[in-house]
Amino acid sequence: MKIAAERVFLMNLFKSLNDACLHYAIMRNYELLPTNIAGSDLDILIVLEDEAMVRKVILHSIKHVNGTAIGCALSHGFFKIFSIGFNNDVENKWWGVCVDVNIGLWFKGINLLNNRQLSDLQITHNGIKVLDLGFAAVLGVLKEVLNNSQMPKRYQIDAAQAVQNDWERLSLALAPMGQKGLTLFRNMILARGGKTDVIRQSRTLRRALFMQAVRSSPMSFARNRFLHEWAKIRRYLHPSGVIVAVLGTDGVGKSTVINAIKPVLDDATHGALEIKHLRPSLLPPLARLKGKQAVQIGPVLDPHGSTPSGTLGSLFRLTYLTLDYVLGYWLVLRPKIAKSPTVILFDRYCYDMALDPRRFRINLDQSVIAWFMRWIPKPNVVLCLHADPSAILMRKQELPLSETIRQVNALRELAQCELGAILVSTEGTIKEVRDNVLAAILNKIKKDNN
């Protein structure tokens, strides 16, 4: 079996958790731990008293092995950390790990778990603490039922067996749900109803949990519900995700670079990576406003083939595109990077309006374009890909050599003056370029975190 790149991080993390005598248990997907996560996330259950220390241990372990946290999204009773790093001792040295930490088990300010029972429901696997398989399945079902109104088939058989054989111990651990909630939940697992039944039963269960929380401790419920909603506002004000823009003239290798770094960022975000082309696309393409049904998808083979608009037409285009970037950021991008430490990767961004206005049929002075761009939210990282213009032209002949040289020089100037911009050469093997690009992203995020 190949040695996983994340091996050093995982072993360091579990050693630190054990040495600090922290109360934790891995909830699922622990078969290959502590050396391999096999593309899954790391789901940990902890107690409230250890929250600050566990977060400190995780962040320190990431940093200790040449990694960095992309971000840490804090919620009431839960936090999520996305991280990337590298391990020079293995062939495929880059790793990405998503860590989900449940501080007990909460649903919209409602406590579902008796933390004092945690030690009774865990076992040891390869030197790490993990949840009993049946209890882990029960919790997996509970989270899916409450959050998504779905009965997850991957947990249902183990959960049903645990409920039949060990209900007394399970009901003690889930005692905060109340007797009615426990009965409804138990019946859901054993009934194995259809989709419509599960949706209806999930709604009934949520209502029962709400009533139980209000009856048992109305002040505590009100406080926890406030903290739950306040966490959402706080994440929106201080988003944990990042936006990365990849710039470069046609033929420099943007698509190749994006495809090369995608697997690592996918692992780091557990599939929450999102790739966009040029703009947020909250507003429809301009061509559609003119009544054209067919909108070009894929690479533009003749970027300068259309005649630039006049002054009024150029101003309209520039205003429309700027509006899409501004509204698209606050209504589409910001909620996504606020909810979790998501990475949104742009193939081109608003800078292309200044670097190559002809592509957008904009015929305006650079000072006018620069004024509009001042209002557009900037990415956290701007990767400026460059290479020898002659080498670029050998890959694609979409632009003349003189225009390619002009754009490469303009991009290099941008990298000198734009905050967050990093100049990266695409001359070399795909693996070398991938390593340089990931290192640039890692170092920029690390610098911003310090």
Image (tube, helix red, strand yellow):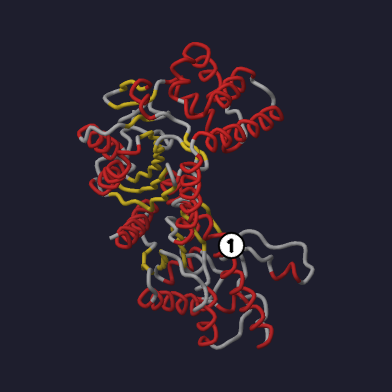
The answer to whether residue 87 is visible is no
Residue type, mark 1 in image? Leu
Q: Position of residue 135 (x, y in %)?
A: 45, 22
User: Which residue is under mark 1?
Assistant: 331
| Nearer-the-camera pick, 315 or 242 | 242
Q: Quadrant of residue 329?
A: bottom right
Image check: 179 left or right of 82? right
Query: 236 left or right of 185?
Result: left
Could you tell me which residue is drawn at 77 percent across and 72 percent down?
290
Query: For residue 397, what is the image quadrant?
Result: bottom right
In the rendered image, the residue lying farthest to the top is: 165
Percent of width and height locating residue 32 = 36, 27
- Secondary element at tag 1: helix
Q: Is residue 217 left or right of residue 68?
A: right
Q: Is residue 173 above or below residue 235?
A: above
Q: Quadrant of the C terminus?
A: bottom left
- How many labels were placed on the picture? 1
Image point (58%, 74%), residue name: 322
Q: Is residue 131 above or below residue 63?
A: above
Percent across and percent down for residue 269 are: 44, 46
The reply, left or right, for residue 107 in relation to residue 300 is: left
What's the residue at 64%, 75% (across, down)? 320
Which quadrant of the figure contains the N terminus? Answer: top left
| 266 is higher (above) or lower (below) than 388 | above
